[in-house]
Image (cartoon, rainbow, N blue to C red):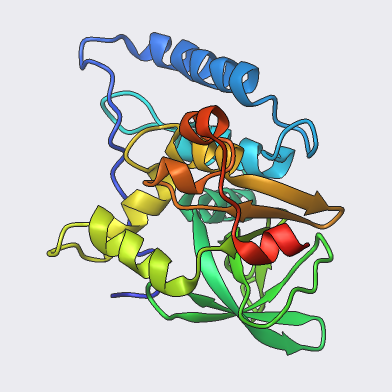
Amino acid sequence: MRTNMQKKAACPYHLKATVPCGRIYGTFADIISRAEDLYVPSAPPMSPLTKSYFTCWAFFDACAGPANETIGTTILETGAAFGMHPELLRLIRLMQDSRMGFYIHRGREGNVSILEDLVTSAVYRAVVPAGYRGGKNENWYVRLLPPPFQEGTEHVVFTTPYIVVHPDFADWLAYFRRTLPATAGFDDYERHMKYGPTREYWNDYIFEAYVNHQADAIYLAGLPDIPESRPHSKISEAKGWKAPAFLRQN
């Protein structure tokens, strides 16, 4: 697999081609308004969907229309047409091309965290503005941005880190083998991580997988395709969630 996003993954959600362009912007407002009502993005304990996570999803991942538009792609197109500064357009493009992903924390070098993409094995040196230092071999679910300056070498963990405390990496790799077809390539993986099978897929995962938090990190447990593994899925809330032994001890 390639280790960097080389082209835009196609958005799987489309309005009918007959929808006038002007209505697409109203569609964005409807999508985001519904999601705000459902998830109440802020910070734990009110909601595990942080404002940084939700804003990135709303601007750069929530797509609609026959042209796979997001608010980000709309800004890029209109900004270029009306003379927006090229450097600002470049930064918006970095945000638009980004997506959440799972990374193995491989340790630190000073203030820099070493993160390895769970699926592609690409390794990144990253700064964490939220301040979370982390521990070796943690599973981080974060939006990792390329160096914001062209001469830079460190990536940026843009969101407050979500730390997946359970299950282990082998179960996550099994999840991707179940979810993606055997013939899947890099673009299929990128599309799954950016858009999910449904528009709210990853939002629902965070919302239902929340187990705890501290000021600079949020802890999750469970897999997206196994409701019983997530503490706040409908099944778990109806029948009770069986926490892993190490969580019960803590």
Q: Quadrant of the N terminus?
A: bottom left
Left or right of residue 159: residue 26: left
Question: Does residue 8 appear in this view?
Answer: no
Q: Is residue 42 above or below residue 135?
A: above
Q: Is residue 226 left or right of residue 168?
A: left
Closest to the observer, 221 or 144: 221
Image coordinates for residue 184, horizontal then vertical, percent: 19, 62
Whether residue 60 is visible here, answered yes or no, is yes
Residue placed most toward the observer, 173 or 222:
222
The mark tally for this picture is: 0
Q: Residue at x 32, y 33 (%)?
A: 68
Q: Is residue 37 left or right of residue 79?
A: right
Looking at the picture, how far across and down is residue 5, in whole percent?
Answer: 39, 64
Q: Residue furthest toward the left?
A: 183
Q: Residue at x 70, y 30 (%)?
A: 41
Q: Hey, which quadrant is residue 111 in on the image?
A: bottom right
Relative to residue 120, is residue 48 depicted above or below? above
Residue 57 or 196: which is nearer the viewer?
196
Q: Residue at x 68, y 48 (%)?
A: 211
Report whether 61 appears left or right of 38.
left
Residue at the right extreme of this rendering: 215
Which part of the image, by quadrant, shows the C terminus? bottom right
Relative to 176, does residue 223 appear above or below in the rendering?
above
Question: Residue 215 in the image: x percent, y percent?
Answer: 87, 53
Residue 197 spot, x, y in % from top left: 32, 39
